[in-house]
Amino acid sequence: MQQREYRLLVINPGSTSTKIGIFDDERSVFEKTIRHDIEKINTFEHIIDQYEFRKNVILETLDHEGINVSKLSAVVGRGGLLRPIEGGTYNVNDIMLEDLRKGYSGEHASNLGGIIAFEIAQGLNIPSYIVDPVVVDELAPLARVSGVPEMERKSIFHALNQKAVARRVAKQLGRPYEDLRLIVTHMGGGITVGVHEQGKVIDVNNGLHGEGPFSPERAGTVPVGDLVSMCFSGEYYADEIMKKLVGNAGFVGYLGTNDAVEVEKRIEEGDEKAKLVYDAMAYQVAKEIGAASAVLNGKVDAIVLTGGLAYGKDFINQITERIAWISDVIVQPGENELQALAEGGLRVLRGEEDAKEYPNQPVKQSI
Ligand SMILES: Nc1ncnc2c1ncn2[C@@H]1O[C@H](COP(=O)(O)OP(=O)(O)O)[C@@H](O)[C@H]1O
Ligand SMILES: CCCC(=O)OP(=O)(O)O
């Protein structure tokens, strides 16, 4: 049996699931995806209200598996809607906890990653970290301009998995990530299409607050005039509109489920509405990839399709049919987030990298 140096608990709260893993150094010894029903998630008014529920689910799962947390060296969580920052591994500190609790840049399940990691680690007197949070911001100045002076485009995306998968693909292609021009499309509860150039994500749709394709639970880009009318119809409070767009749109809005497997089952049973919505999501993803290819002047080394939805064969076929003319399409279903979290923590534990202190140098705005 190989001797381990470090044992890490890694925690990845997504919009539709909580994923956890135990890593002995780089080696995964336990992984579990705990899926959450939309009905259960909808019983909580705010993301922070899910704290006890998600933490208990994690602790119960570990207990059930007979995993003794007292042997851990560190806890690493996926982080959250903080201020825009550069990528890397960050210590969970007080300012970060405050920003995660209030949702500095909005509400998303990943806000809970740092908070739960901190709570578990504190009880054990070990460090807690977050790695490449969803607010990693490497946008080019051109990509920041929205067209409305009061609004700047923001970088909110699956930074952790997009970077991890891009590096994995670079390895497969035998080239440095920094030399490649990639379009990485993560398709999970949210969908983000990132333009990777010289090792940076220079443009990406804001996967949370209404940009890009609709997703299992989010609206993506919507007709703006109609949205303004809805906001001022007198029928909704602001937080109701936000929940409609983020959480209750996409599959959930049209079909009442965030589960693509369930949608595929309905299609097989002849449900035409399910088919139209599923096909429309594939269509919108392909359209966004087409737009991303224009950012790179059509010179694209590879298009990568990843995330839970990439397991859907028909979904991937539909997207590929529309984009294969642009470049090679590489499908990497699922995600590499647990491994990426573990590796980010290990780099710091081994002294290969210093943990960054939040909020170190917030990213500059362009105008
Ligand atoms: N085998 C599969 N075939 C099709 N879709 C799948 C499959 N497995 C998971 N999915 C879908 O992927 C989506 C979740 O993706 P995931 O990346 O796990 O999301 P998140 O991390 O945002 O919770 C769900 O809609 C789920 O139904
Ligand atoms: C907030 C962008 C990242 C995201 O959408 O994550 P999930 O797909 O896990 O909800």
Image (cartoon, rainbow, N blue to C red):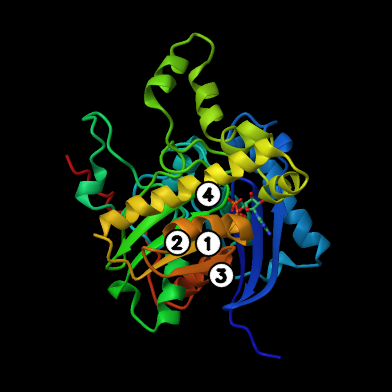
Crowd tier of the residue under label 2, counting other residues whose Cα lies within 10 Å: few below 14, some 14–19, many 20 or above: many
The residue identified by callout 1 is 306
Distance from the alpha carbon under mark 2 to that under mark 4 = 19 Å
Query: Residue lying furthest top in this view?
Result: 234
- Residue at 38 percent across and 56 percent down: it is 194
Mark 3 or mark 2: which is in front? 2
Q: Which residue was labeled with disc 3?
A: 339
Mark with earlier residue (2, 4) = 2
Q: Position of residue 177 (x, y in %)?
A: 35, 74
Q: Quadrant of residue 124?
A: bottom right
- Do callouts 3 and 4 mark residues in contact (Cβ within 8 Å)? no
Label 4 environment density (alpha carbons within 10 Å; few <14, some 14–19, many ≥20): many
Q: Residue at label 4?
A: 282
Residue 162: which numbered mark, if any?
2
Do residues under tags 2 and 1 come within 8 Å of each other at their CB atoms? yes
Relative image position of residue 120 (x, y in whole percent): 63, 55
- Specify whether tag 4 is near ligand 1 (CB below 8 Å): no
Q: Is residue 356 above or below residue 247?
A: below
